[in-house]
């Protein structure tokens, strides 16, 4: 039981980090990233492939973060001349390309067979029975770090600038700000965070294959941001917990409702999760927590 | 305070909500610790791509458990089945498997249909010392160190590819193409098919890959069938194969189609999907004796299906539960590390073949030898956990009904 709860909490941390990354890109920066799962997948694969080739797990993770950040910045630059809606299409297209590349380039990625035997950080130095607990702590350390980092960014002058480019890019540009550079930076930081989430995913499952990464990941991240309240990191943090606990908690329906068979319950479960999310949006249309605003007098 | 008062209220509401969602997680432990059933998990594809096969598996597992419990259970205890949905997705599958293992306390997981889910759950099962009895065919499932915990109740991809090549050659095909779905299992049948077909004097024209859930298979179908190969092998499942068969029929191509019985029959679902005309003449192959095994007839009877139904994954699960029950009784232990050691001897042994596990349980208690003849086929186990020694039946759909037209090794 305890290890089940620990594993579920790790999933919460991973999904929340992905949600926070999206919140930076879309919530604060107004950049719609429908290709989220592609960057996440890239992070997971870079980390997993290096890790299984014998690179120390933490170094592999660092490489994954750097690669996803660089690729994210590059992708945001491709769409320089495209208006914002098209960024969504470009990023989605990019993510599909990543998925197809990984599915077909077997010499590098083992294709649909996936990458087994991914070693977790500190695997050699902690006893096996502590491995889940140590990994849980590792994941939450990252979650805390990401949360604090984003809070810092949001409240810094850079955060103001990011919000300004979201609300009216022309005004920001007229004031002499380099909007493109701001957007590339936002995308790169978001990408780096997705690299973190992807690496944690690879470590958590210790086996990855292309079918683990799909637009469902986008859906979870967007759900977290929309429910949490666009722009509010605290909101996304709470919503990340809500979404994953709803998804996981509903698995137990099968044990408490014996008169429905598994096939009916499985369909009902996904339906209930959807209904729960709709209900949250009806009662909290702007999300759970409002975006941080600098008020006069506040430091 | 940086947050307006409303935020705190929302925070409380959200915390309560997440707590409420999480609460049921804590509930079952106490209740389950006290009883003394033997717990078995079924991780079935109730939704997602494998959805068409999920219910079949669940019905089979419930029927097998009921059959054994009605005769007094195993080691004097009842079997208790826990069903979880893997959504045909590895991530959901691992989460569901964790729930089965850590919360429900199962000692074996049966029914895993997708090889991708099986490969993702495998490290977890090995770590926790839980037996894994999958239906997936990807060769990798039984490769490497399985600690003797993984026993596959399905043909591996290698044998299956070879059987298809033999069947196509027997039908007089000189040229063949492969139109293959991108999954670990279906891909693992490609090379063996190519090798056996070429060795038999045939020529492979094309190997074309496609992805699941494509809106259309037009491009792939045209590419393969335009070159008019004699035979086209389509390793896939019922949703994709239905779409492809329709596309082939619409375009008027005449190459013969070959696929698995679970794609082109599956309790008659395929013909229902596409209609008799499209299904006419389609060939499918499956390990036999699905048709005349008494275990298979028992399975159909207990699940209330008609005697000539072809339901392969249900039959797989039926075998898995029966073998588990026999192995647990024989090992006198419900611990996976103990009872998995008994699995090969149950099917490889000498003695009279039995088809009803209840009979087997009785013989074990009397200390008499026997071997279990499976519902899916009269299989034996190799030491690595693969089924071997199978005969494959070659079926052809004629006027909406699958008929056995031949068999091969």
Image (cartoon, coloured by chain):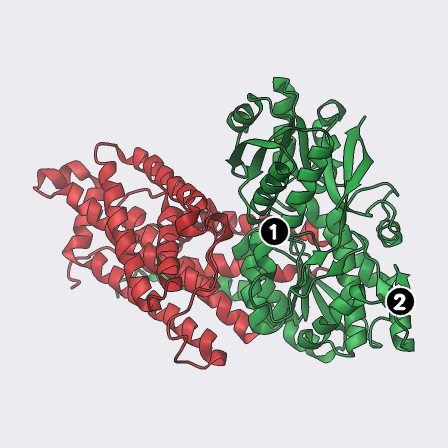
Chain colours: A red, B green
Please rate how many residues cluster around mark 1, counting C-alpha atoms within 10 Å: few if below 14, some from 14 to 19, many from 20. Answer: many
Which of A158/B276 is in front?
Answer: B276
Where residue A200 appears, as percent x and y from the top left, is: 39, 63
Q: Residue furthest left?
A: A176
Callouts 1 and 2 in the same chain: yes
Q: Is residue B210 above or below residue B372?
A: above
Q: Is residue A190 visible?
A: no
The residue identified by callout 1 is B114
Numbered marks: total: 2
Please rate how many residues cluster around mark 2, counting C-alpha atoms within 10 Å: few if below 14, some from 14 to 19, many from 20. Answer: few
Q: Is residue B124 visible?
A: yes
Q: Is residue B28 left or right of residue A43?
A: right
Where residue B380 appears, as percent x and y from the top left, is: 76, 60
Instruction: Give the SS element for disc 1.
Output: loop
Point 67% across, 53% down: residue: A265
Which of B6/B381 is in front?
Answer: B381
Q: Is residue B12 above or below residue B175?
A: below
Instruction: Give the SS element for disc 2.
Output: loop
Where residue A191 appears, as percent x and y from the top left, is: 29, 52
Quadrant placement of the N terminus of chain B: bottom left
Point 42% across, 68% down: residue: A119
Q: Quadrant of residue A140?
A: bottom left
Point 49% across, 48% down: residue: A112
Point 70% across, 28% down: residue: B274
> Along the polypeptide, which appears first: circle 1 or circle 2?
1
State which chain disc 1 sits on: B
State which chain disc 2 sits on: B
Q: Quadrant of residue A156?
A: bottom left
Q: Which mark is residue B351?
A: 2
């Amino acid at each position: 039981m305890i290890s089940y709860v620990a594993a579920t909490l790790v999933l919460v941390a991973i999904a929340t980090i992905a949600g926070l990354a999206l919140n930076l890109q879309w919530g604060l920066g107004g950049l719609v990233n429908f290709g989220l799962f592609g960057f996440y997948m890239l992070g997971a694969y870079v980390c997993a492939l290096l890790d299984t080739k014998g690179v120390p797990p933490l170094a592999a993770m660092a490489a994954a973060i750097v690669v996803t950040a660089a690729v994210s910045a590059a992708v945001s630059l491709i769409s320089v001349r495209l208006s914002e809606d098209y960024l969504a299409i470009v990023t989605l297209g990019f993510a599909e390309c990543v998925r197809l590349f990984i599915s077909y380039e077997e010499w590098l990625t083992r294709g649909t067979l996936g990458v087994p035997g991914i070693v977790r950080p500190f695997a050699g130095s902690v006893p096996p029975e502590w491995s889940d607990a140590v990994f849980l702590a590792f994941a939450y350390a990252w979650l805390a770090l990401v949360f604090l980092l984003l809070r810092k960014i949001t409240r810094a002058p850079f955060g103001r600038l990011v919000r300004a480019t979201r609300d009216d890019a022309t005004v920001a540009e007229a004031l002499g700000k380099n909007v493109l550079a701001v957007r590339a930076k936002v995308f790169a930081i978001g990408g780096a965070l997705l690299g973190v989430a992807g690496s944690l995913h690879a470590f958590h499952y210790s086996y990855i294959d292309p079918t683990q990464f799909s637009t469902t990941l986008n859906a979870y991240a967007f759900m977290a941001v929309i429910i949490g309240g666009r722009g509010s990191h605290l909101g996304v943090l709470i919503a990340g917990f809500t979404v994953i606990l709803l998804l996981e908690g509903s698995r137990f329906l099968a044990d408490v409702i014996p008169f429905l068979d598994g096939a009916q319950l499985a369909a009902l479960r996904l339906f209930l999760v959807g209904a729960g999310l709709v209900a949250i949006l009806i009662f909290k249309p702007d999300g759970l927590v409002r975006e941080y605003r600098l008020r006069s007098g506040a430091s | 305070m940086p947050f307006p008062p409303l935020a705190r209220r929302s925070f409380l509401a959200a915390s309560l909500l997440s707590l409420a969602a999480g609460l049921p997680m804590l509930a079952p432990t106490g209740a389950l610790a006290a009883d003394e059933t033997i717990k078995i998990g079924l991780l079935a594809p109730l939704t997602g791509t494998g959805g068409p096969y999920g219910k079949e598996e669940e019905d089979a597992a419930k029927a097998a458990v009921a059959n054994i419990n009605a005769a007094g259970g195993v080691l004097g205890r009842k079997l208790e089945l826990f069903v979880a949905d893997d959504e045909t997705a590895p991530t959901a599958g691992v989460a569901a498997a964790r729930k089965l293992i850590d919360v429900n306390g199962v000692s074996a997981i049966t029914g895993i249909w997708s090889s991708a889910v099986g490969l993702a759950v495998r490290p977890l099962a090995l770590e926790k010392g839980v037996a894994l009895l999958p239906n997936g065919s990807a060769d990798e499932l039984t490769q490497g160190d399985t600690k003797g915990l993984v026993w596959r109740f399905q043909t591996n991809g290698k044998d299956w590819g070879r059987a298809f090549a033999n069947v196509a050659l027997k039908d007089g095909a000189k040229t063949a193409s492969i139109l293959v779905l991108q999954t670990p299992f279906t891909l693992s049948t490609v090379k063996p098919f190519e090798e056996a077909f070429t060795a038999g004097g045939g020529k492979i024209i094309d190997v074309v890959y496609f992805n699941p859930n494509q809106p259309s298979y037009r491009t792939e179908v045209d590419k393969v069938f335009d070159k008019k190969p004699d035979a086209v092998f389509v390793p896939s499942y019922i949703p994709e194969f239905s779409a492809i068969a329709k596309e082939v029929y619409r375009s008027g191509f005449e190459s013969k189609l070959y696929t698995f019985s679970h794609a082109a029959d599956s309790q008659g679902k395929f013909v229902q999907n596409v209609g008799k005309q499209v299904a006419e003449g389609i060939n499918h192959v499956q390990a036999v004796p699905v048709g005349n095994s008494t275990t298979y007839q028992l399975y159909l009877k207990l699940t209330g299906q008609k005697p000539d139904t072809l339901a392969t994954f249900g039959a797989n699960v039926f075998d898995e539960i029966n073998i588990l029950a026999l192995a647990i009784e024989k090992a006198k232990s419900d611990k996976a590390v103990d009872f998995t050691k008994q699995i090969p001897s149950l099917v490889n042994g000498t003695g009279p073949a039995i088809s009803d596990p209840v009979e087997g349980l009785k013989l074990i208690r009397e200390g008499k030898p026997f071997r279990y003849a499976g519902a899916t086929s009269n299989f034996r186990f190799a030491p690595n956990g693969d089924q071997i020694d199978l005969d494959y039946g070659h079926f052809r759909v004629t006027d909406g009904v699958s008929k056995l037209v031949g068999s091969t090794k």
